[in-house]
Image (cartoon, helix red, strand yellow):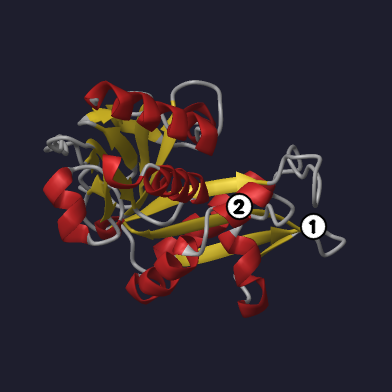
Amino acid sequence: MEVIDLPGDQEQLYFWCLEDWSEEMKEAGNRKALWYRKMRDKGLRVKLAVDDSGKIGGMVHYLPIEHSPADGTGLCFILCIWVHGHKQGRGNFQGQGMGKALLEAAERDARERGARGMAAWGLVLPFWMKASWFRKQGYVKADRNGMAALVWKPFAAETAPPKWIRERKRPGTAPGKVAVASFVNGWCPAMNLVNERAKRAAAELGDQVAFQEIDTSDRDTLLEWGVSDALFVDGKPVRTGPPPSYEKLLKLLAKKARKLG
């Protein structure tokens, strides 16, 4: 196994998070590609894990924390580290040490680039991106926001721990309409998928819905709201993990619209 930098001819595979077999990834549109082209000039790094047969089985991407949903100085932030574990497509590569190899390669690269530490996020429940996995790799908790733990590993003494950027305001309602506000950063296809489905559902109901898309890849916008990726309907958050289906979102908006009379 080896870890390599993202080759130009594998960019689309990266945009699909190695799930080139998934129709949902295609449904998420091209927002991740647009985000990638914006962020690669701001320090975004992508690495892939390749097994001995030449098959790509894992990925990690990270960038300076100044372009992440966390606040810190001199750190790199891991947005996602993922080893393909589905039977579909390329198959299950988990349990072979790819995740640890990707993390070590990212840390080494960050050190060489002068970072004072590495931060990452993980769920406190045993699902995807588990915080417990990072703790086994020497990371400690710096902050927590709901189920999302912010963990980090300092490389230098007297380095301040990171903190989550917290919600500062919420979108409001719209007189006589269902108000839908979709916050989307671009790095995660799952949230891009939520945005595309919400947009389609809103369009289906026409003038009954006021749809607002908020691009939080812009740092000032992220700081203004304190929200990176989320969906709000009439000022209230909608659960987005796992991504709700288009039909479920359409049903929700239609029900809200009927109540308006």
Disc 1 + disc 2, Cβ < 8 Å: no
Please tell me which residue is depicted at 39% across the width and 49% down the height of the picture.
Answer: 203
Give the number of marks. Answer: 2
- Considering depth in this image, is 139 or 162 the residue closer to the camera? 162
Left or right of residue 225: residue 88:
right
Ranked by sequence position, the earlier of labels 1 and 2 is 2
User: On the image, numbered disc 1 is attached to which residue?
Assistant: 51
Helix, strand or loop status at disc 2: helix
Please tell me which residue is depicted at 24% across the width and 25% down the height of the picture.
Answer: 261
Residue type (three-letter) at the residue carrying disc 2: Met
Residue 9 vertical position relative to residue 101 in the rendered view, above or below:
below
Left or right of residue 104: residue 2:
right
Looking at the rendered image, the disc whose residue lies closer to the viewer, 1 or 2, is 2
Can the viewer see residue 21? Answer: yes
User: How far is disc 1 from disc 2 in space, using C-alphas?
Assistant: 23 Å
Left or right of residue 102: residue 197:
left
Q: Please state the horizontal and vertical placement of residue 169, each as a whole percent of the image.
A: 12, 37
Helix, strand or loop status at disc 1: loop
Query: Where is the N terminus found, in terms of image quarters?
Result: bottom right
Q: Toward which corner of the image does residue 99 lie, by quadrant?
A: top right
Q: Please state the horizontal and vertical placement of residue 153, each as a whole percent of the image.
A: 38, 43
User: On the image, numbered disc 2 is attached to which residue?
Assistant: 25
Please tell me which residue is depicted at 49% across the width and 35% down the height of the picture.
Answer: 134
Residue 8 vertical position relative to residue 186 in the rendered view, above or below:
below
Q: Residues within 10 Å of mark 1 (few under 14, many from 20)?
A: some
Can the viewer see residue 100? Answer: no
- Considering depth in this image, is 20 or 90 the residue closer to the camera? 20
Left or right of residue 124: residue 76:
left
Residue type (three-letter) at the residue carrying disc 1: Asp
